Amino acid sequence: MFLSSRAGLRSCGARIATSNTRCASVLAPTAPSAPTAAAATPLHNNNNNKINYIQSFSTAAKPSTAQLVKQLREMTGAPMMECKKALSTPEVDHDLEKAQEWLRKYGSAKASSKVAGREALEGLVGVKIEGDRASIVQVKSETDFASRSETFSTFVQEIADAATAGEVNGDVDIGAFMASAKDSKGQVLSETLNDAILAIRENIQVDSMVIMKASSDKSVLAGYVHGRAPNSTCGSAAAVVELEVTSDAGSGKAEEAAKKLAMHVVAAKPSYLNPESVPEDVVNKEKEILLEKMTGTNKPPEIMEKIIAGQMRKFYEGICLTEQSHMVEEGNPKVSKAMKSLGLEVKNYTLVGMSK
């Protein structure tokens, strides 16, 4: 029993010795080989010839497809499946910048072809006034939900801003304007329109555009937007009014008076500036109607003339801005008289609203 134990100890000792030898060979310092791009790089070398190494690894993982799709949707507003398709296209290869270009080229064209011809009765009106120039634009969409979105209202305001910055006055050739003018980012407005269609997925039409320019250096332009969309400067109707200062008393009152008159214009909806601006055929047609109403009354001609003159005054009060009762001023004075008392004169106005 004793001998067997000693033999076992000798055997165990041999194994321990062998193990120590192996450990010593592992722990012995060796000359480091030249590091490669993926190899360990020496960090510290001291007098004991011990060398510490640090292995470099890339910790920045590539974003997943789902993350890229989310980013692309936030950047373009395009539907999820369209974004996924754009990113997976071979020439794009999950590059966000290339994916945006792909969506502009293929996604916008596809979306535009799908919505073309669909009825657009909703929308917004945008206004921009800059110095002696002002613009009012009307852009239509298919649904009220789309027109109240931030994407849509931002697009409308971009159009108004670009229109004011240009040199055209009066009515504008919308097609030519959209093909040449640029938005605040330097992109042609026709491409901005395509981006909006891609994001909203509705038929969007720039329906009308009017640019006003002050007729003299004594004039002031001011406007009012009614029924504004949430977090937007655009609304369901808008008016811009030009007032000219005719006396020193009016110089400090012109802008506020013009804003109030613009509010009146939106509410009263005049068709003409003054009686002199009403087309002759419209005046003659109204007189014919009044004469027909008095046929068979056997009234003397001079009496009929007075009756017609009185009726025409009422007619002008309904359609001419200067003859209307000012709905915003206290006491509702006639617009022309109210402006004259302030040392001002109404020179021009523009009204644009969504009609359904």
Image (cartoon, rainbow, N blue to C red):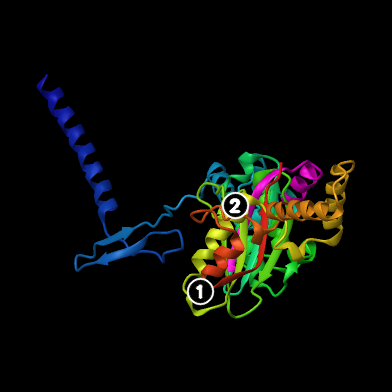
Q: Is disc 1 surrounded by few (<14), some (14 to 19) or many (20+) residues within 10 Å? A: many
Q: Start and end of the magenta stretch?
A: 108-129
Front-lying residue, 282 or 195: 282
The local secondary structure at tag 2 comes to helix
Quadrant position of residue 38: bottom left
Q: CA distance from mark 2 to mark 1?
A: 35 Å
Residue 153 tag number? 2
Q: Residue at x 28, y 47 (%)?
A: 22
Residue 250 tag number? 1
In primary-sequence order, the first of circles 2 and 1 is 2
Q: Is disc 2 surrounded by few (<14), some (14 to 19) or many (20+) residues within 10 Å? A: many
- Magenta-colored stretch includes residue 158: no
Along the horizontal axis of the image, is 147 left or right of 292?
left
Q: Residue at x 24, y 51 (%)?
A: 24
Front-lying residue, 284 or 156: 284
Q: Amino acid at mark 2?
A: Ser
- Quarter of the image containing the C terminus? top right
